[in-house]
Image: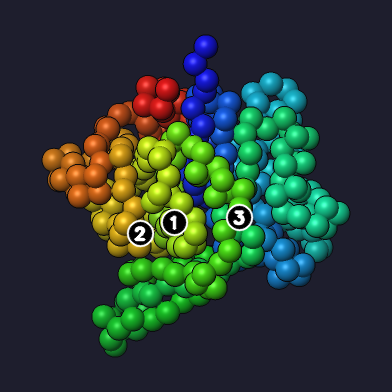
Amino acid sequence: MTRSPRVVALGGGHGLAASLSALRHVTDQLTAIVTVADNGGSSGRLRTELGVLPPGDLRMALAALCRDDEWGRTWADVLQHRFRSNGELHDHAVGNLLIVALWELLGDAVDGLDWVGRLLGAQGRVLPMSSVPLDITARVIGLDPDHPEALTEIRGQAEVATTNGQVVDVALDPSDPPACPEALVAVAEADWVVVGPGSWFTSVIPNLLVPALCRGLEQTSARRLLTLNLGEQKGETDGFSPETHLEVLAAHAPDLRIDIVLADEGHVPDPASLRRTAQSLGADVVIADIANDDQHLHHAPDKLTKVYRELLV
């Protein structure tokens, strides 16, 4: 009997959750490597107060890996539940508090996440991209009305995601953070690495800015699949075509080769142009129906499952 492929998925937020929801139906050897630069909401508050990794994107990945039975769906709902009050607990997610509690008890981020995964019966493992909390900085144009081409540096994932300017590039602070050792092992042993979809500058590209992790992605024998977003994201990628997404990614990780670029059939205005740009990264283009018919600019996990199964197995 042929074993399931070892698959590593990178990113954060809703995009990574969509990929994981699909990939857990394709393989039983799945690892998520998650961006840890969030500075907003419940995650930002816990990070500031306790000095921990921001748990929110890690929580979302764990919830996406929950099984479809009653146990899995119930625990996924518990993880995602947010308190509503006039006090300090307002808007804290239960899963964030659970993860941070285990970190404090066990003294290790990976151990804590593994324990949460066992509690949930998660169909895969969740790891942080780095063992320390990070900040995203961005160079942005268009913020100074008197000098629209002037570059302004802004700091923080939440601030970059909602800027009124146009993001030129992003960096991490610290610029040479330690990669999670378990993440490096997972990438080295993978058969496939899946990058994206997700917020391009604040969820997808940050994984490529951790030097050791990026080197691992460049050197792995795994094939690399990049799932493109369905369109531009207000505040981050206004005006971006599918080709622009690839060009920006290549500018941040120029030595990273891609084998397959996966795009939605309804969101590729110029397939020939996309193929030419993908070719410069070493990639073939697969165009398929992967969009959610009911949620604008969201991927459909069931459609992704079908395409991933055809490509990865």
Tell me the residue at 77%/41% (across/down).
Answer: 115
Can residue 298 be seen here? Answer: no
The answer to whether the residues at label 1 and label 2 have Cβ atoms under 8 Å apart is: yes
Q: Quadrant of residue 30?
A: top right
SS at circle 2: loop
**Residue 220 in the figure: left or right of residue 262:** right
**Residue 253 in the figure: left or right of residue 55:** left
Task: Name the one closer to the observer, 1 or 239.
Answer: 1
Q: Amino acid at mark 3?
A: Cys
**Residue 178 in the figure: left or right of residue 172:** right
Q: Amino acid at mark 2?
A: Ala
- CA–CA distance in space, label 1 to label 3: 12 Å
Can residue 247 be seen here? Answer: yes
SS at circle 3: loop
Question: Which is nearer the N-term, disc 1 or disc 3?
Answer: 3
Question: Which is nearer the N-term, disc 1 or disc 2?
Answer: 1
x and y percent of residue 57 in the render? 60, 51
Question: Which is nearer the N-term, disc 3 or disc 2?
Answer: 3
Q: Which mark is residue 180?
A: 3
Tell me the residue at 37%/22% (across/down).
Answer: 310
Tell me the residue at 76%/70% (across/down).
Answer: 49
Tell me the residue at 58%/26% (across/down).
Answer: 28
Q: Amino acid at mark 1?
A: Cys
x and y percent of residue 150 in the render? 30, 83
Residue occupied by mark 2: 253
- Which quarter of the image is occupied by the C terminus? top left
Residue occupied by mark 1: 214
